[in-house]
């Protein structure tokens, strides 16, 4: 049973589409259909049913994917590493993720990739777009500050980042002078990543302040925008430590102490398993994982 037939099956299973699998594998849809048909003949079972928006796996396909997919990924990763030792790594990799994290953290690790002859293309995006762009093959690696829900993608934790409530000194003093922290923060403008308040809600819930029902005065998916507004004296927000630690150390921002506990946010490296067939992507992933995880460990030790 050929490896390409098995890879075609796994790709169709993950993408739920013959045409999408063909694009991912650089094959024609006819080739992929033949691979699936041949595999069905060999197994004596049907693997997919036609659906309105693609194909639907049968129970046989579900069982085969559970037994096969991860092992096939590991085998191809091993082959990619072997090829990387003897294949030119020159080429481009495309990375999609949160703009502020890429600017403040990821850039520290990109020189190693450039030194290896790899060109880098960066694109800011929120979680939902990130997932879709990776699945469709438009990007090679992703950086997400939120857990990835699509099981077709793989993730690895790269950073656990403290998040803190901060404001300009005068604003922070007004908040802290209020007898009630809830009233204090409710009386000031709220700056947030988005309307659904992902970082804000975690901090409020962790500190027993669920009664604060605030509507953001400003939202921005690039947290550097919020930091600059805070520095200008507008409102309060929750920021990851890497974005505000220098301003706090210099006294340009003040931390609003959490009444109960500090909270953290997690960051993940994300990829579609089949993308690791490309030696330079597998190489870049390994360099970034090692560098980002080591940086996080070193900062925790300080």
Image (cartoon, grey):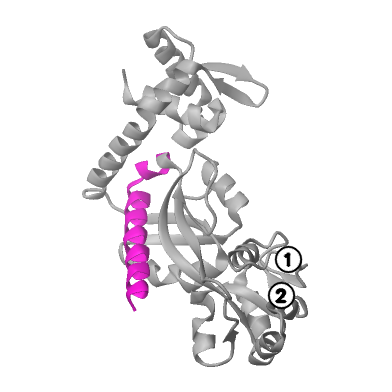
Q: Quadrant of residue 200?
A: bottom right
Instruction: Assign the magenta stretch its main secondary structure.
Output: helix
Boundaries of the magenta span: 274-302
Left/right of residue 287 with respect to residue 219 in the rendered view: left
Q: Looking at the image, tell me whether mark 2 or mark 1 is earlier in sequence order.
A: 2
Res 55 seen here: yes
Residue shown at the point (55%, 60%) measured from the top left = 123
The x and y percentages for residue 109 are 38, 68
Q: Residue 182 carries which label?
A: 2
Residue shown at the point (74%, 72%) measured from the top left = 218
Local SS, label 1: loop
Marks 2,1: beta carbons within 8 A: yes
Q: Which mark is residue 116?
A: none
The x and y percentages for residue 59 are 49, 17
Q: How crowded is mark 2: few (under 14 residues within 10 Å), some or many (20 or more)?
A: some
| In the image, farthest residue toward the front | 179
Left/right of residue 91 with respect to residue 178 in the rendered view: left
Left/right of residue 93 with respect to residue 240 in the rendered view: left
Location of the N terminus (image quadrant): top left
Left/right of residue 277 with respect to residue 26 in the rendered view: left
In magenta segment, residue 300: yes
Res 113 seen here: no
Local SS, label 2: helix
Q: In which quarter of the image is residue 275?
A: top left
The x and y percentages for residue 195 are 73, 61
Identify residue for label 1: 211
């Amino acid at each position: 049973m050929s490896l390409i037939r098995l890879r075609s099956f796994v790709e169709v299973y993950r993408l739920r589409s013959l045409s999408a699998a063909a694009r991912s594998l650089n094959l024609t849809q006819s080739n992929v259909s033949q691979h699936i048909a041949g595999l069905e003949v060999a197994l004596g079972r049907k693997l997919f049913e036609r659906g309105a928006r693609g194909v639907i796996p049968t129970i046989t396909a579900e069982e085969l994917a559970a037994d096969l997919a991860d092992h096939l990924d590991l085998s191809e990763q091993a082959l990619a590493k072997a090829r990387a030792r003897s294949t030119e790594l020159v080429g481009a990799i495309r990375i999609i993720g949160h703009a502020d994290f890429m600017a403040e953290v990821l850039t520290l690790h990109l020189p190693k990739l450039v030194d290896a002859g790899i060109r880098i293309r960066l694109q800011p995006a929120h979680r939902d777009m990130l997932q879709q762009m990776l699945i469709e093959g438009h990007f090679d690696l992703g950086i997400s500050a939120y857990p990835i829900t699509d099981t077709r993608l793989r993730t690895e934790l790269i950073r656990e980042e403290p998040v803190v409530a901060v404001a300009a000194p005068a604003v922070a003093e007004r908040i802290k002078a209020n007898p009630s922290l809830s009233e204090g923060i409710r009386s000031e403008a709220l700056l947030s990543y988005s309307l659904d308040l992902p970082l804000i809600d975690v901090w409020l819930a962790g500190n027993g302040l669920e009664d604060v029902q605030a509507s953001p005065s400003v939202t921005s998916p690039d947290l550097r925008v919020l930091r600059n507004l805070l520095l200008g004296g507008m409102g309060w927000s929750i920021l990851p430590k890497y974005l505000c630690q220098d301003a706090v150390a210099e006294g340009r921002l003040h931390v609003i102490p959490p009444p109960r506990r500090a909270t953290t946010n997690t960051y993940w490296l994300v990829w579609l398993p089949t993308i690791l067939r490309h030696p330079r992507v597998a190489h870049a992933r390994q360099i970034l994982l090692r560098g980002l995880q080591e940086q996080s460990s070193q900062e925790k030790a300080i």
